[in-house]
Amino acid sequence: MLRMTQKDILQWVSQLPVQEQVQVAEKILSNVSKGLMTKMSTSPKKKPIRRRRSLYGVWKDLGFTITDEDIAEARKEMWSNFGEREI
């Protein structure tokens, strides 16, 4: 059996009339498409990605609110001693 490289095939196809080049290209694309579909159908299925539910407004029914000042105070408390203690 004759073994042709990609370069040999491209040279051979380029010598064909344009209409035959188109037919060769269509056949190649058809084979590639079938191969990809077969590969996709036999590959293991991945779990679908589940979207995370938004937590916006999750505390609205609990009867209290968190203000910007509350957040600023909590940040100040958390970061007040940062870097002062050696490990």
Image (cartoon, rainbow, N blue to C red):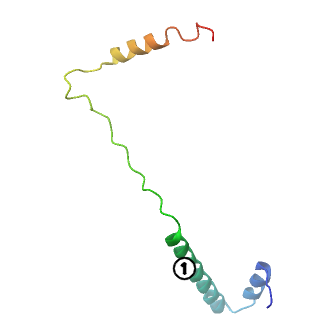
Residue 17 placed where, x, y %?
Answer: 69, 92
Relative depth, front residue between 32 and 17: 32
At x 19% / y 29%, what residue is drawn?
A: 61
Residue 20 placed where, x, y %?
Answer: 65, 92
Label 1: which residue? 34
Q: Tag 1: Cα neighbours inside 10 Å, few (<14), some, or many (≥20)?
A: few
**Vertical relation: 79 (above or below) 23:** above
Residue 27 placed where, x, y %?
Answer: 60, 86
Kindly indicate the quadrant of the structure image that contains residue 68.
Answer: top left
Answer with left or right where residue 3 lies relative to residue 76: right
**Vertical relation: 28 (above or below) 86:** below
Answer with left or right where residue 74 lies relative to residue 30: left
At x 43% / y 10%, what residue is drawn?
A: 77
Residue 5 placed where, x, y %?
Answer: 79, 80
At x 55% / y 77%, what residue is drawn?
A: 33
Amino acid on which the number 1 mark rests in the picture: Lys
Q: Quadrant of the N terminus?
A: bottom right
Relative depth, front residue between 42 and 72: 42
Answer with left or right where residue 28 lies relative to residue 75: right
* Number of on-image labels: 1
Q: Quadrant of the C terminus?
A: top right
Answer with left or right where residue 67 lies relative to residue 10: left
Relative depth, front residue between 8 and 62: 62
Q: Secondary structure at mark 1?
A: helix
At x 38% / y 12%, what residue is drawn?
A: 73
